[in-house]
Amino acid sequence: MNISDYLKPRNKDSILYKSHSTPNLQKLCFEFNNLLNCIVIIYKEHQQFQAKFHSEEQQEKAVLNEKCINFLVETQLNLQSLKIQLQISIDKSLYFVNQQIKSICEKNIIDIQTQQNLESKNKDFTKKDYLKSQVKHCEHVYESLLSNITCLLRDQLINTIKQHISKISYEFKNFLSQILNFQREQQYSDQIFTYKLIEDYSIKQKEICCAMALNKDNSIIVVGCNQYIKVFEFNKGKMKQIQLLKNKHTNNIWTLNFMKYSKQFISGSYDNSIILWSANQNNQYFYNQKLDLHEGNIYCLVLNIQEDLIISGSDDKTIRFWNRKNDKWFCQQVITDHTDSVFGLSLNEQSNRLISCSYDKSILVMQLSQNQSS
């Protein structure tokens, strides 16, 4: 290779361009190109998917379409940034080349002056020998220079492209996840059914209905209508009243709860009382026991999993625990930490933790003590 060959303008077949074709860099460029192709494909699929939406879903389409456009615009900006960084890297390399050329030229001038002095001393050293040595020296210097430039460009390009591919891949996965989630939501929304009122099975009531409950096998419904409890047989969506329970509560019934392991249910009323109702062999319900220690309306009732503990919340700001002994119920404990009406109660599945909420803007958590028996 001659010195003039190194000074020619670089084309796509030059060493500088070939340096970009190292296996690692080729792989990165290939992956980068595939990523861009995937983005275009996903965007097209997204447009096709949007074409299937109904007119009432225009708002959702607009939101997703905006996200898609924003992602593509951001990707475009990232590519422009990559282009700028590559240009900066190339400019730095060219500056490095120019500095090396300048250094070599200055060194050659010094060498020529030195060699002229040697010539005067050594007449056997011809000018031809000197030129040969200078050509070899320059070739060595330029080969070393190009090797350094190749390594510099390769490392800079690999790091830059890796960073951009990593960033765009992360954003692309997030964007793809959003599209998939939106498609799942859309498919789910297409499958959502709607309830329809069955006029023939509906029942008009003269009284106010504040509470209702279904038994375990969905065959009996009890409804609190003012101070009365209506018992309905429930069969294939049809309700047929079979019993009326009256003269026990004296005010509106606010809560009803069926027991799962016995033919019983409990009712809580504005008359400050809780009543247990039991069914006989003919499935007729009768009054069993009244719990009337509360001094305010009964707003909520819950049963533990063994159904041997009733917990009640009242307008008197207390929570009472009623324990069953020999088929009779007794108040075992009273919680007085709330400062206003207790409206809600909830037990966890193990029935060892109770949560209550109150008009006093507080939620209390209670734990069953370890030394408590079941």
Image (spheres, rainbow, N blue to C red):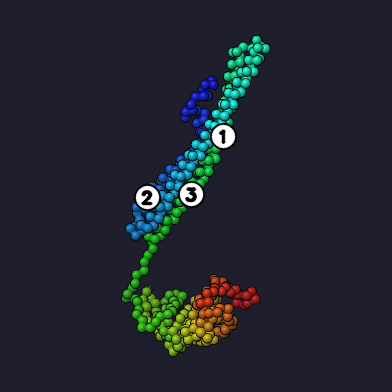
Check the image and report above or below for 46 versus 87. Answer: below
- On residue 171, which mark appears? 3
Look at mark 2 in the image and give the residue it sits on: 47
Q: In which quarter of the image is residue 370?
A: bottom right
Give the CA separation, mark 1 to mark 2. 43 Å
Secondary structure at badge 3 equals helix
**How packed is label 2: few (under 14 Cα within 10 Å), some, or many (20 or more)?**
some
Q: Which residue is drawn at 43% across and 75% down?
A: 218
In the drawing, does residue 189 fall left or right of residue 95? Answer: left
Numbered-mark total: 3
Q: How far apart are marks 3 and 1 (CA)?
A: 29 Å
Figure check: 67 above or below 128: below
Which comes before the other along the chain, label 1 or label 2? 2
For residue 261, say whether it is visible. Answer: no
Disc 1 designates what residue?
Answer: 152
Asked whether the viewer can see residue 82, the reply is yes
